[in-house]
């Protein structure tokens, strides 16, 4: 199984809502990533988990809260988002964290709209 | 600031043409360069990861080269096919930070 799954595919939420994005992989990968991609822009790295510990946090606002309950699952909890947070949120995993020498396997993304 | 630039932004070629595009990245504190292929409505798919200056990698009709001293990588597609139509993203890993370029959108016309 070389698939990374993400749920939901689409999410519309108001600025006062609390929601979560989920990501799952069963490849035994030990690093997982969250990216944010706005239209016609490059994906931007948000968080990296290595061996279930947060290793990189790219100065992301606290209204985004990552969680890695186990080595197969990665969540992104959302609270009090702004309309400018509307974007495609991509999850990825790699067999090891290292120094970027491992290819990443991406999920299809969650399209988030904040109203 | 880590800037990764890709050119051209978009490219239209005829089936059978060979084509190439460029990724430029900072050469300082460089560790790895990734290429991904992203078809519409699908997940980005890894093509190559390269780390050494002078690296050349090949997968079928697609190949890539790496120059870490001057900070550029080329991706080549030989004999383009309509199914090669996609956005090709590169990403550079420097000093514990990974940054993507905005991609080159390739359209191959039958």
Image (cartoon, coloured by chain):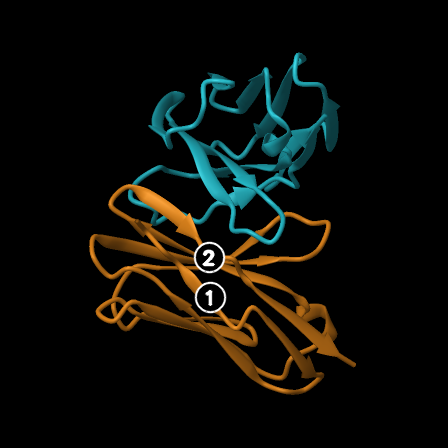
Give the colour of chain B. orange
Give the residue at x 32% y 43%: B97
Q: In this view, does A31 lie above or below A103?
A: above
Q: Is residue A12 above or below residue A91?
A: above
> Which label is found at residue B104?
none
> Any mark on residue B101, and which?
2
Query: What residue does disc 1 label?
Result: B6
What colour has chain A?
Answer: cyan
At x 48%, y 31%, the residue is: A28
Whether residue A69 is visible, yes or no, is: yes
Residue under the image location 60 percent in, 33 percent down: A84
Give the mark nearer the N terminus: 2 vs 1. Answer: 1
Q: Mark 1 lies on which chain?
A: B
Count up the numbered dots.
2
Classify 10 Å Cα crowding around label 1: few (below 14), some (14-19), many (20 and above): many
Which residue shows up at 43% across the image and 72% down it? B64
Image-quadrant location for residue A99:
top left
Position of A8 with respect to A54 (left or right) is right
Provide residue B38's location: percent of width, then percent of height.
62, 56
Q: Mark 2 lies on which chain?
A: B
Image coordinates of residue A112 in percent, x first then y, are 68, 31
The reply to whether dot 2 and dot 1 touch (C-beta < 8 Å) is yes
Q: What element carries label 2?
A: loop
* Residue B19 falls left or right of residue A32: right
Q: Are marks 2 and 1 on the same chain?
A: yes
């Amino acid at each position: 199984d070389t698939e990374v799954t993400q749920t939901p595919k689409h999410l519309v939420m108001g600025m006062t809502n609390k929601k979560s994005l989920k990501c799952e992989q069963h490849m035994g990968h030990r690093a997982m990533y969250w990216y944010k991609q706005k239209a016609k822009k490059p994906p931007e790295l948000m968080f990296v988990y290595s061996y279930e510990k947060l290793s990189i946090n790219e100065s992301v606002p606290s209204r985004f809260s990552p969680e890695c309950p186990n080595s197969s699952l990665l969540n992104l909890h959302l609270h009090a988002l702004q309309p400018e947070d509307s974007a495609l949120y991509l999850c990825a995993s790699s067999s090891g964290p290292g120094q970027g020498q491992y290819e990443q396997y991406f999920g299809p993304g969650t399209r988030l709209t904040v109203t | 600031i880590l800037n990764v630039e890709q050119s051209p932004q978009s490219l239209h070629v005829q089936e059978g043409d060979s084509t190439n595009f460029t990724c430029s990245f900072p050469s300082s504190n460089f560790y790895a360069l990734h290429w991904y292929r992203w078809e519409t409505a699908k997940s980005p798919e890894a093509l190559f990861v390269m780390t050494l200056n002078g690296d050349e990698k090949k997968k079928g009709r697609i190949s890539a080269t790496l120059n870490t001293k001057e900070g550029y990588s080329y991706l080549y597609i030989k004999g383009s096919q309509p199914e090669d139509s996609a956005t090709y993203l590169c990403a550079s890993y420097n000093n514990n930070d990974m940054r993507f370029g905005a991609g080159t959108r390739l359209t191959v016309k039958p």
